[in-house]
């Protein structure tokens, strides 16, 4: 269980200001969704939090420690699954221990029962225990992303970051994967941050939302505060009508349940 503090974070790529003076704090065990159009800075924020990208200015503290480079306590799930096609679901999940223990140590600990147990438990969390021996390339996009979640869990992180984890999935699979992500974070008391561009999906699974526009934080609040005006503000000139069904969280959830059966 950790707290994340982001203080005046700025990231510039040459002339492009991808993040502009962004500050917020995420408490232990919170599940936060980052919203914004393509290019608003969502990936850059997650990459800075994961230590994969060094900020131009500002500071990130995870559990009070400044982030400079990747660390085993922070796991990242990517848009494009990033799993190994020719490896089984189990092998992919087990590879999460490389991030935890380092390649050589992981290699030498290949017979470690505890790690194998963790891989199986992680596959159980995403309901893929029966598919453990299945090669990743034979799995659907949704199943592959669930393997990606399992691999992140084997890293035994305190923080789970997901960069557009369902962007390449159909609506049904997207909901399913988000549900597994939410359950995994809840069950293990992880502090989680996921970027999403679908507002309806975000409202269904997020508790708190951070809205980015042109690299600036334009919203930070809870589900009931994420009104149509706020969504318009985050998405600017983009047509937002279809993104926002219902005016309350309950109506929203109901409409989504009707849209895609669980
Ligand atoms: N490695 C890079 N080099 C140069 N510019 C970059 C780089 N990464 C991102 N940018 C720029 O920074 C801005 C923010 O990009 P970022 O990928 O963080 O946005 P995003 O909201 O995640 O978009 P998407 O949803 O399309 O991934 C964009 O203008 C992008 O072109």
Image (spheres, rainbow, N blue to C red):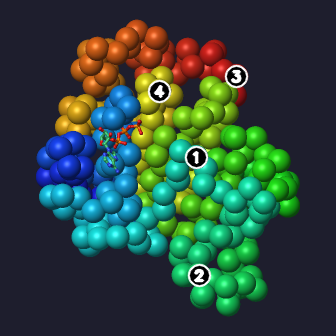
CA separation, marks 1 and 2? 22 Å
User: Residue at point 57% right, 61% down?
Assistant: 152
Residue 188 falls in image quadrant: bottom right
Residue at 68% x, 77% y: name it: 115
Question: What secondary structure is marked by label 1?
Answer: loop
Give the residue pinned by disc 2: 103
Quadrant of res 70: bottom left
Q: Is residue 3 left or right of residue 77?
A: left
CA gap, disc 2 to disc 4? Answer: 36 Å
Q: Which structural element holds mark 2?
A: helix
Residue that mark 3 sits on? 261
Toward the viewer: 237 or 195?
237
Q: Dot 3 lies on which element?
A: loop
**Residue 183 visible in the snapshot:** no
Q: Residue at x 29, y 68 (%)?
A: 67
Residue 106, compared with residue 93, is above or below; it is below
The residue indicated by pointer 4 is 198
Judged left or right of residue 251, residue 215 is left
């Amino acid at each position: 269980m950790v707290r994340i503090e982001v203080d005046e974070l700025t990231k510039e790529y040459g002339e492009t200001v991808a993040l502009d003076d962004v500050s917020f704090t995420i408490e232990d065990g919170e599940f936060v969704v980052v919203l914004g159009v393509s290019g608003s800075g969502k990936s850059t924020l997650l990459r800075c939090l994961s230590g994969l990208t060094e900020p131009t200015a500002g500071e990130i503290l995870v559990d009070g420690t400044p982030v400079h480079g990747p660390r085993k306590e922070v796991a990242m799930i990517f848009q494009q699954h990033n799993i190994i096609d020719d490896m089984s679901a189990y092998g992919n999940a087990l590879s999460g221990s490389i991030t935890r223990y380092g390649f050589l140590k992981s290699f030498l600990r290949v017979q470690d029962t505890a790690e194998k147990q963790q891989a199986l438990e992680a596959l159980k969390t995403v309901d893929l225990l029966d598919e453990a021996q299945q090669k990743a390339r034979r799995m659907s996009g949704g199943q592959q992303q669930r393997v990606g979640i399992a691999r992140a869990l084997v890293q035994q992180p305190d923080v789970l970051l997901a960069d557009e984890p369902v962007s390449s999935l159909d609506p049904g699979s997207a909901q399913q994967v988000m549900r597994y992500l939410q359950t995994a974070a809840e069950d293990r008391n992880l502090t989680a941050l996921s970027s999403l561009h679908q507002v309806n999906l975000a409202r269904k699974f997020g508790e708190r939302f951070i809205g980015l526009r042109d690299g600036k934080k334009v919203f930070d609040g809870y589900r009931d505060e994420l009104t149509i005006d706020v969504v318009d503000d985050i998405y600017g000139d983009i047509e937002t009508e279809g993104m926002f069904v219902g005016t309350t969280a309950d109506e929203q959830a109901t409409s989504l349940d009707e849209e895609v059966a669980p």
